[in-house]
Amino acid sequence: MIWFDQNKRNLPWRHESDPYKIWLSEIILQQTRVAQGMGYYLNFVRTFPTIQDLANASEQEVLRLWQGLGYYSRARNLHFTAKEIWNERNGIFPNNFQDLLNLKGVGEYTAAAIASIAFQEAVPAIDGNAFRVMARYFNINLDISQPKTRKYFFELGKEIIHPDRPGDFNQAFMELGATVCLPVNPKCEICPVNDSCEALGRNKIKELPVKTKKTKVSNRYFHFLEISDGDNYLMVQRTQKDVWMNLFTFPLVELKENEVWSSNLILPEIELEKKQEEIHILSHQRLNIQFYQAKVSSKQLKIISKELNADIFPMKAINELPIPRPMEKYLMNKI
Ligand code: SF4
């Protein structure tokens, strides 16, 4: 704790005791590095200073602010939960670990982080960083991808958590993992617990933590169609339960790995020219993306919009829509 007090990074949410803002920071930091998440956190707090502001926003506004951060289900859950707390719980944030677990998008780690930091409940918050520090410090050879191992770490965390400063204790573990006990080349020489670390003493750092389950990544093949009359563009909202749900894109054709793209597949009446390709990596998916472009008359644009069930937007309005990162990059190249 002395090390944490002297070395903790000065992060904006560390000055907060408001559970709303702590929750916001924890959701933003899931799957996101601090450096990337910081700007998003500040923007959210500025735009929606209270849970009431977030609850009363439209989902489109929330997704737009989240744009570029990825894992958009986090933003949808954030908005859903804000509305639920504001409308059904009189705006009162749940104040303990068990009740926090009932919130959409809040798992064990996030519930424990909020409960300990905002309400000083002595419950361990074990994220990837804390797993690594604990596995090494205590020389635990169990596979952390197994649910029963996670339970083991949780029980161990309950035994060692500081009863008077549980929030700082949890943050200290995470901070140690994020800044000193790094996955590769940990800085053991400056580590505050190097005199009692089992993995260091036994030369087992590279073997820990044990994680056997590899994430299976599947390939998908997306073909985006930029169809415009020069001023107006076709856009569709992705309503299906899939990547980028509720975000807007150009009309999109997805093909199987062995299917060959041809304009005739979808719009034989127009010539689509290939403009750009890129690979976009998500946690479980590798998106192989190609952009095609066609300029048509205003009359044709209206006909095609009906065929593709798309809406027509001027570019200025597209800039206000929540769109996925690859679309954003493509549009940036055009401006
Ligand atoms: S001594 Fe090294 S391996 Fe052990 S907890 Fe510290 S940084 Fe991690």
Image (cartoon, rainbow, N blue to C red):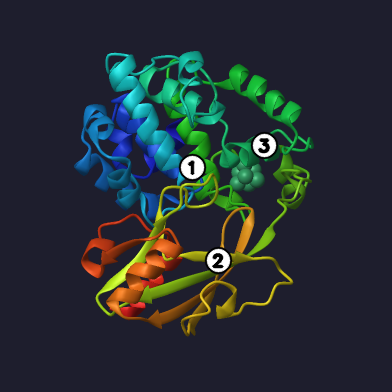
Please say whether residue 193 is visible from this viewpoint: yes
Residue placed most toward the observer, 155 or 250: 250
Ligand 1 sits in quadrant: top right
Nearer mark to the viewer, of 3 and 2 = 2
Task: Find numbered disc 2 in the image and state the secondary structure of the residue it sits on.
Answer: strand
Q: Is mark 3 within 8 Å of ligand 1?
A: yes
Task: Find numbered disc 3 in the image and state the secondary structure of the residue it sits on.
Answer: helix
Q: Give the percent coordinates (x, y) of residue 235.
A: 37, 62
Question: Considering the image in quadrants, where does the C terminus appear?
Answer: bottom left
Residue placed most toward the observer, 294 or 195: 294
Q: Is mark 2 within 8 Å of ligand 1?
A: no
Q: Earlier in the sequence, mark 3 or mark 2?
A: 3
Q: Which mark is residue 11?
A: none
Q: Earlier in the sequence, mark 1 or mark 3?
A: 1
Task: Find numbered disc 1 in the image and state the secondary structure of the residue it sits on.
Answer: loop
Q: Label 1, on which residue?
A: 30
Q: Label 3, on which residue?
A: 137
Query: Residue at point 56% right, 37% down?
Result: 127
**How packed is label 2: few (under 14 Cα within 10 Å), some, or many (20 or more)?**
some
Q: Give the percent coordinates (x, y) of residue 94.
A: 39, 16
Nearer mark to the viewer, of 1 and 3 = 1
Query: Residue at point 41% right, 74% down?
Result: 226
Q: Label 2, on which residue?
A: 253
Amino acid residing under circle 1: Gln
